[in-house]
Amino acid sequence: KYSDVFGPHYDLKEWLEIETTEKFCDFAATEVFRYKSFEQFLQAGSCGNSLQTLNTPCLFINSLDDPVVPEYLIPHEKLRKNENANVVYTERGGHIAFLNDSMKCWFMPLAKAFLEVNLYEDK
């Protein structure tokens, strides 16, 4: 039905049979974006490649159980060296699922406070 969207480049049947996040990410990286591996895809798109030029305060929130951006790919040292990089690590959260025990998103108040302090106050 949607083969015109995917064109002849992807095996839609194979895509629909994927059952894990890891396999989905690997398929997308290698088949869709044509990288040799998912890790090569992540390295190419990593913010670590440009952190040295970050000159505006920026808030990074990353969960250490993120299946899409695993901890070993986080450029910890580069983040520590840049005074504009403000980092929050959580043990749980997966990939952008920062919910508290009540299933409410907890990072929005944090992000709002960060913006108020860093972007709206006279320095």
Image: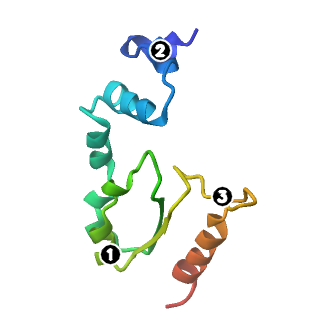
**Can you see residue 9?**
yes
Q: Residue at x 49, y 91 (%)?
A: 123
| Residue sticking out furthest to the bottom | 123
Q: Which residue in the rendered view is the most extreme toward the right?
A: 102
Tags 2 and 1 in contact by the CB under 8 Å rule? no
Residue labelled with disc 1 = 80
Which-is-in-front pick, marks 1 and 3?
3
**Residue 35 location, quadrant:** top left
Provide the residue designation for mark 2. Answer: 12
**Distance CA(mark 1)–CA(mark 3):** 26 Å
Earlier along the polypeptide chain: callout 3 or callout 2? Answer: 2
Q: Secondary structure at mark 3?
A: loop
Q: Position of residue 50 (x, y in %)?
A: 28, 61
Q: Going from the N terminus, do you reach mark 1 or mark 3 first? A: 1
In the image, taking residue 27 as reference, residue 65 lies left or right, namely: right
Q: Mark 3 sits on what residue?
A: 99
Image quarter hosting the N terminus: top right
x and y percentages locating residue 48 in the rendered image:
29, 60
Colour option used: rainbow
